[in-house]
Image: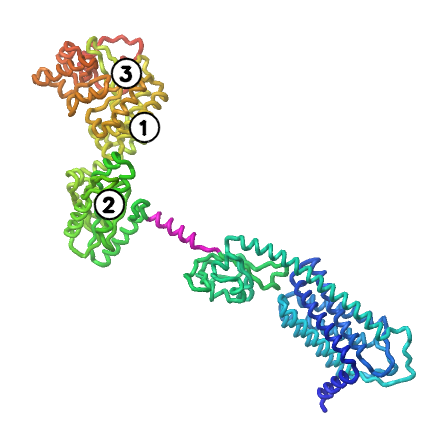
Amino acid sequence: MTLGGRCVFKFLTCLTTQHDLRLVLVAGVVCLAGCFTTFRLYSRMRGARGVVRAAWLLLTGLVAGSSVWATHFIAMVAFTPGLKTGYSPTGTLLSLMIAALFMASGFAVASAQRTTTNDFAGGVLIGLGVAAMHYMGMSAFVTQGQLVWEHATVGLSAILGVCGAIAALVLAGTARTIRRQALGGGLLCLGIVLLHFTGMSAITIVPDASVAVPDQLLSGGMLTLAVGSITSMIILGGLGAVAIESQTSRSALERIRRLANAAYEGLVVVQSGRINDANAAFCELAGAPLSELVGRPLFGEMLTFDEAGPNRDDVRREGHLRPVVGGREIPVEVFSRLMDDGARVETSGLTVLAVRDLRERRAAEEKIRYLAEHDGLTGLPNRNSLQMRLAAAIDRVEASGESLAVICIDLDHFKEANDQHGHLAGDALLVETARRLQSAVQAPSFAARLGGDEFIVVQIAGGDQPAAAAELAGQLIEMLAAPVAFDGQDLALGSSLGVSLYPDDGRTTEALMANADMALYRAKESGRGVYRFFKREMDDSIRERRNLARDLRQGIADNELVVHYQPLARASDGEVCGFEALVRWRHPTRGMIPPLDFITVAEENGLIEALGDWVLRRACADAAAWEKPLRIAVNLSPIQLHNPALPTLVHEVLITTGLSPSRLELEITESALFKDYQRALDNLRRLKALGVRIAMDDFGTGFSSLSTLQSFPFDKIKIDKSFVENIHRHDRATAIVRAVLGLGRSLEIPVVAEGVETEEQILFLRGEDCAELQGYAIGRPAPVDSLGAWTLANAQVDAAPKRKARRSA
């Protein structure tokens, strides 16, 4: 018979013939309970640090050692050799200490790092500890005979114990689940049992009557009672500690879960690529309850990343989460970190992922991108987007041979509708215009909004130019001519168009748009409601006006404007009683530019209001510094007159400069009233309430002079110089001047005659009781620093000599 066969035969013979099988069963139950409790404690030990870890390690070693020790001695009590037996107290207690020491050491080594090497080393220590305890316990066994050992069987028993311990540690792993704890405890129990009974089969007792068993030795009954009591207390204590710690852990876990479920972001714990746990937010994203998610592979199946990245902690990556039950993939942002669960990071094997839903952020980013490239009101591409799209269109037609036209569109009646019906009406016009333009063009052609009431259509066509552009421009004019319904009424629309062609009129986006804009300018000068193509030889004058407008805008900012003052004198004695402020422009390269050359440019380009405000402030500041309290007259443009903020501006200027309101005269033309008659009258009444004087300029050239005088009590009437210069030249002009002067006397409104240049005119006007005179015969416009003869308090200058001196000069 082979050695293995003999060992198995002796093992079975020993177990069945020399042991009380009932006690053997008790020993097995004790061993199994103790080993299961050991692995329960072992799982807690792996999840702890510092002093807590040391306490769990001590309890684990004590429970494991006492379990092995109890198994051994209960099985020894079950051993019935037929001779008187006893047990040495010293050897018995020493075997318990050896078992506890080896067990604690083995589990400490196994938990140091989660590697197979550590599990193997820890298993060797535990197996050797079981063997050392067994044979130390056998040394405490005393009987009436001699023990004869079979060394090969002894070695085999040690090997069986070591293998059982290694298998238990390797297969149990971290022992975090009941199943793993039961598996590890069962394998360790099997190794202990095999070692014990194989070791028992290695002895043969040779009876010897000369060997006495001392009475002071522990009997089998006493040993059974001691072992049972000690082991029960230790195992129950270990189970109690586990139960208390488990309850505490469950309470803490429940608190953590509540906090995790309150988080807006999805949190998921992953172990070995599979979902271990997750909060409510992640379950909602995944579209499944936690019970269906646990154990499911996460990476690749549910979560995919846009770009490959390193798997390390504190990594931010973007990807897509695929819900469990259908649905579209969700864009997510994922932050990963190795989980610190109280154990060493390398032993936990857990990774926590924070999964952030990017749908709202992506939608917001898309909206921001859309708003950056499109007009917020009409939805058309804006100026920035137009530049990029037009550049791309130029590249396209260069490659394809197609034709390209840029059509600049300006609405003819937009400002009137906006002023009369409010901004909502203006917005309705813009939105309807955008809709009509979009319906008129098809991709790759497109429409865009530059700002205000100006639009652009970029036409990409296969036909010849300029025929294709002319056809589209005609369609657009006809389409935009239809009125727009708003608030129960039809608003007039209409448009003017300017067209430039690629490459004849420009090869860049800037050149094409600038030339289309100049063609539009010429279309508006032609009477509106028409389109014009860019013609280089015809648009030089427009370019010049544009350059002048650009220089004027800079000139206002650089303080290049100056104010000259023309005196007004009483007709009765020639005494200067005030001045009219007249603006001049000292251009750095063109020299002094008269108002007739730049006022119209300012009106066309939206600069007249800033220009008028500057003149008002300058004139009031200069007049406030004069020693004599002479009046100062300032002309108001129609735009200023219809600005609701005009009275507030005048009030602020008067306060700032310290000029008395009674010294300020604001001159308006009659035609300026009729753009918005009621608003103009409201402003004039508010100005009068401030104490400011109001004069009607160029009287006699308007449409309804008499009705205007009836509607508003003007402080002064100024006869237009076209009538004054023809006194005694044309009888009708003389009659008109005489009639206006008579009208002024009847209404008790002083009349000022403009354009007085001769002594004959002065005498006539004085004879007709004209109140004041203005013109070259009185004085030419001059800078403020040359007015001292009139503005100083002690200056006494006769009017007639002054005129002679000026004429001789």
Q: Which residues are magenta?
A: 356-373
Amino acid tagged 2: Thr
In the shown orientation, is residue 494 left or right of residue 104?
left
- Quadrant where the image shows the N terminus: bottom right
Instruction: Give percent across and percent down for residue 18.
Output: 79, 83
- Residue reaching furthest bottom? 1
Q: Amino acid at mark 1?
A: Ala
Mark 3 and mark 1: Cα distance apart in space = 23 Å
Give how far apart the Cα atoms at labels 2 and 3 are: 50 Å
Q: Secondary structure at mark 1?
A: loop
Rendered view: 480 above or below 278: above
Query: Which dot marks residue 645?
Result: 1
Horizontal and vertical percent position of residue 276: 56, 63
Q: Is residue 321 left or right of residue 714?
A: right
Q: Earlier in the sequence, mark 1 or mark 2?
A: 2
Residue 427's disc number:
none
Name the mark nearer the viewer: 3 or 1: 1
Whichever of labels 2 and 3 marks the residue nearer the N terminus, that label is 2
Res 433 label: 2
Residue 734: x and y in percent read 10, 16
Q: Is residue 17 above or below residue 44?
A: below
Q: Quadrant of residue 778?
A: top left
| Residue assigned mark 3 | 631
Residue 372 covered by magenta stretch: yes
